[in-house]
Amino acid sequence: MKRPASDVFSAQALQYIPRLRRYARALTADASAADDLVQDTLERALVKQSLWREGSDLRAWLFTVMHNVFINQVRSAAVSRTLPLDDSFADQPQLQSTDRLEIRDLDAALQALPEEQRTVVLLVGLEQMTYEETARVLEVPIGTVMSRLSRGRERLRRLTQGLPETASLKVVK
Amino acid sequence: MSEQPVTETELQAYVDGCLPTARAVEVAQHLARHEEDAQRVAAYRRQIDALQAAYDPLLTAPLPARLQPGQRQRWLPLRHYAVAAALMAASGLAGWQLHAYVAAERAQTVYLARVAAVAHAVYSPEVRHPVEVGADQEAHLVRWLSKRLGTSLKIPHLAPVGYALVGGRLLPGDRGPAAQFMYQDAKGQRLTLYVRVSKEARGQTAFRFAQENGVRVFYWLDGRLGYALSGETERGELLRIADAVYRQLNP
């Protein structure tokens, strides 16, 4: 029996949920908002699945969908966030408690980056995408990816090392 | 030495290990002579390690129910309502984008959900005295509570979604008097609508969802009024009712 195309799509998309979740968590610094973002992304992806060409890179496509959902949410700060008061804690992965403080610091530093730098720093550093993949996901030229990466990493370094934020950034070729 | 200068892009590519080997060797030589660049490269590599150490546990963490494969047919119907509600609210918004304001407002609306859930838990199991004024005196109920809250209240009629008004009561709220209206379906299942008034209009928000000790709550702000609809009803059903309430209050 031939499976409907949407089943094939869903089955393939499923394997990327943990990666979408990891990225969303680092992006939003909020476990509940991150899972909302993943859920919204999956819904959008299901609706738009006909736009995905079978055989092309589904991971990149899903991250593109997530990026667009995220940007829409950022631009309309009024979007509802679901705030499950109790089960958000149950949803939290069990991180080592000794790591908690450091993660909070890292969360805070990432949130201090402009969203456009944060996304590049995370796609390259956490998701380990190539610069070309990152450029495709964000739909920007590769030169833009490089300059955002450079500025984002430097700013993150200054934030985490308690250095003054200088405006004197190197010219990026 | 006829060495090509190392660009910023190359430094980044060196961090990410994607330079061709020959060039990577040259960059390493450059770093040996330039302490400041070497420190930056080392710091960027530590950043990557820290990111992975912090967030990689999510790759193996169990997925919450709403993201699980078995639930994926439910990705659509449930959240669709929330998205529609968000769009509906967002379209009527202006000047509602300041982050700090939103954060403060969010803390207060979470409080709204909490007190409403508690009020629901206290009064909805009540057999003999679920309300102070019954639905048979609806006109009096509206006048009384409108007067106490200092604003003209409307009581939504939920018969179209299967719930009849039981009545209402006055409650102490965090910023003065608050009102609770109670509804009941044919099976005796109860819902409560909690209403409170603020001094200033706080704009309009989309529906938000909270859950506390088995009580599910959809809550939202509309001008000076804050609403919270609470029940033990399944979330999707409760959202449909919240939507009906909203529509009646904003015809």
Image (cartoon, coloured by chain):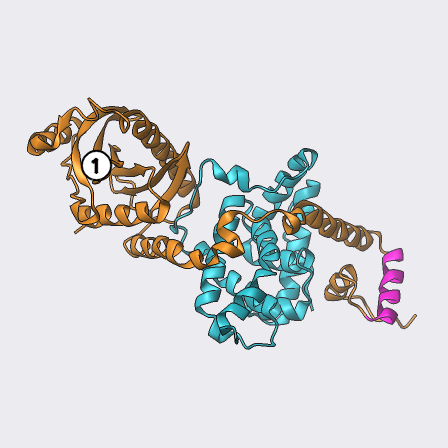
Chain colours: A cyan, B orange
Q: Position of residue A124 (x, y in %)?
A: 67, 60
Residue depicted at x 65% and y 41%: A103
Q: In this view, does A44 lie to the left or right of B175?
A: right
Identify whether B170 is placed above or below B68. Answer: above
At x 61%, y 54%, the residue is A18
Residue A89 in view of the camera: yes
Task: Answer with the quarter of the image where residue B13 lies.
Answer: bottom right
Residue A163 visible from this viewpoint: no
Q: Name the residue rendered at 30%, 30% in the picture.
A: B120
> What amino acid does circle 1 point to?
Tyr
Q: Quadrant of the C terminus of chain A?
A: bottom right
Relative image position of residue A29 (x, y in whole percent): 56, 45
Q: Which is more toward the observer, A160 or B185?
A: B185
Q: Mark 1 points at which residue?
A: B183
Q: Main secondary structure of the magenta part?
A: helix
Q: Crowdedness of circle 1 by 10 Å Cα count: few (<14), some, many (20+)? A: many
> Vertically, is A118 above or below B140?
below
Q: Circle 1 sits in a helix, a strand or a loop, which is it?
A: strand
For the record, the magenta segment spans: B20-33
- Judge whether residue B30 is colored magenta: yes
Instruction: Tell me, yes or no, whether the highlighted magenta stretch contains residue B185.
Output: no
* Residue B17 coordinates in the image, percent (x, y): 79, 63
For residue B96, side relative to residue B165 (left or right): right
Which residue is rendered at x = 80% and y = 68% of the image?
B19
